[in-house]
Image (spheres, grey):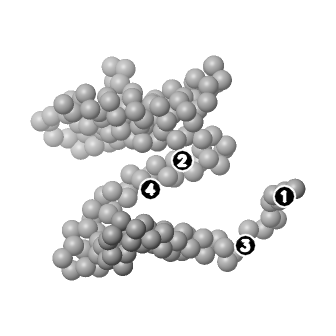
Amino acid sequence: MIRLEKRPQPSKVWTFATPILAVLLTMVFGGIMFGLIGTSPLEAIRTIFWDPLFHPQFAAFSRPQLLVKAGPLILIAIGLSIGFRAGIWNIGAEGQYIIGAICGAGAGLAFYPTESALILPLMIVAGALGGWAGALGGWAWAMIPAVLKVRFGTNEILVSLMLVYVAENILASVSS
């Protein structure tokens, strides 16, 4: 029988090699998939990985856009890593991000056209914790699966994942 044992000390080589290997394997298997659908694998990999950063036509536009899109994802990843270290699985971070964005935008729109340096911090607080009048922010939306797990013993993975679809429908109803 195979038994897994925790190493006393993680390998320093694999600590640095794992992300590099993950990107290389993504490129290889992505290239294979693109080749199977009839697209040039090298051109597809160049378009996805190289052009947004280094192509003169796209890089000036793509670099700032990469940072704009990566910022919230990095913030979500940092928040999730804390929960994962505690043994709490939260698959519904996308829904919490959506609800937080709705609450943050709602806080900004509530004071339109007022100009104040306090509106941006208010938007951040409303998006993170929850707005006024019972609006749920990202934190409050994350508390739904937490309370259901503690009170009723539900599976937080399933509940947080299902709440993503609820958040997407709320966004669709608010934006239309």
Residue that carries the numbered disc 3 in the rendered image:
11
Determine whether the residue tagged by mark 4 lies in a helix, strand or loop.
Answer: helix
Residue 150 occupies quadrant: top right
Query: In whole angstroms, how far apart are the C-alphas of marks 3 and 1?
Result: 21 Å
Q: What amino acid does circle 1 point to?
A: Ile
Determine whether the residue tagged by mark 3 lies in a helix, strand or loop.
Answer: loop
Q: Give the left or right position of residue 79, taking residue 169 as reference.
A: right
What is the crowding at mark 4: few (fewer than 14 residues within 10 Å), some, or many (at least 20)? few
- Where is residue 112 shown, x and y percent of the image? 15, 34
Residue that carries the numbered disc 2 in the rendered image:
80
Residue 68 occupies quadrant: bottom left
- Of tags 3 and 4, the one toward the viewer is 3
Determine whether the residue tagged by mark 2 lies in a helix, strand or loop.
Answer: helix
Q: Give the left or right position of residue 149, taking residue 164 as reference.
A: right
Q: Earlier in the sequence, mark 1 or mark 2?
A: 1
Q: Residue furthest right?
A: 1
Please report contact status of discs 4 and 2: CB closer than 8 Å, yes or no.
Answer: no
Q: Earlier in the sequence, mark 3 or mark 2?
A: 3
Q: Residue at x 25, y 27 (%)?
A: 173
Residue that carries the numbered disc 4 in the rendered image:
74
What is the crowding at mark 3: few (fewer than 14 residues within 10 Å), some, or many (at least 20)? few
- Of tags 1 and 2, the one toward the viewer is 1
Where the C terminus falls, by quadrant? top left
- Where is residue 107 shown, x and y percent of the image? 27, 33
Please report contact status of discs 1 and 2: CB closer than 8 Å, yes or no.
Answer: no
Residue that carries the numbered disc 1 in the rendered image:
2
Q: What amino acid does circle 3 point to?
A: Ser
Query: In whole angstroms, how far apart are the C-alphas of marks 1 and 2?
Result: 30 Å
